Amino acid sequence: MKALEKALSGLNIIIKIILVILGDIYGNLTRIARSAAKGNILGVILAIILWLVIGWNIILIIDLICVILKIKIWWID
C-alpha cells in the first residue's frame, strides 16, 4: 500500500483536482492507502464508511482545498 500512496502523491495537481471533483476518489484512496500502510484496520473501515455514507460532500470540499493548497490530505493517522 505504500506504493499506492507514493503513486497517488506523485500525480499531477490537475489530475488530483479532477479526481477530487469526481467523487473524491483521490482523497479517499489516499486515506485507505495511508491507513493500510500503517496496519490500521479501523482507519481503513472508517475511510470506506466515510466515502460511502457519511458527509462526503463536506470531505470533498476539505480535500479540494487541501489539494489546491498542496497540504497533506486530512486523516486520523
Image (cartoon, rainbow, N blue to C red):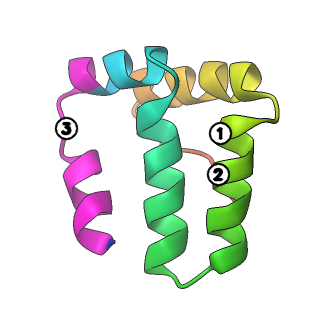
**Amino acid identity at mark 2:** Ile
Mark 1 sits on what residue?
Answer: 51
Question: Looking at the image, do the residues carrying marks 1 and 2 touch, with CB atoms under 8 Å apart?
Answer: yes
Q: Which mark is residue 23?
A: none
Residue 9 on image: x %, y %:
28, 48
**Amino acid identity at mark 1:** Trp
> In the rendered structure, which disc, 3 or 2, sits on the residue that comes first in sequence?
3
Relative to 29, say whether 2 is above or below: below
Residue visible at 61% across and 65% down in the picture = 44
Residue 48 on image: x %, y %:
64, 51
Mark 3 sits on what residue?
Answer: 11
**Residue 22 appears left or right of 4:** right
The magenta segment is 2-15
Relative to 48, say whether 68 is above or below: above
- Secondary structure beneath dot 2 equals helix
Q: Nearer the viewer, residue 24 or 48?
A: 48
Mark 2 sits on what residue?
Answer: 48
User: Magenta stretch containing residue 8, yes or no?
Assistant: yes
Question: Looking at the image, do the residues carrying marks 1 and 3 touch, with CB atoms under 8 Å apart?
Answer: no
Residue visible at 22% across and 68% down in the picture = 3
**Is the residue marked by circle 2 packed among few (<14), some (14-19), or many (20+) residues within 10 Å?**
some
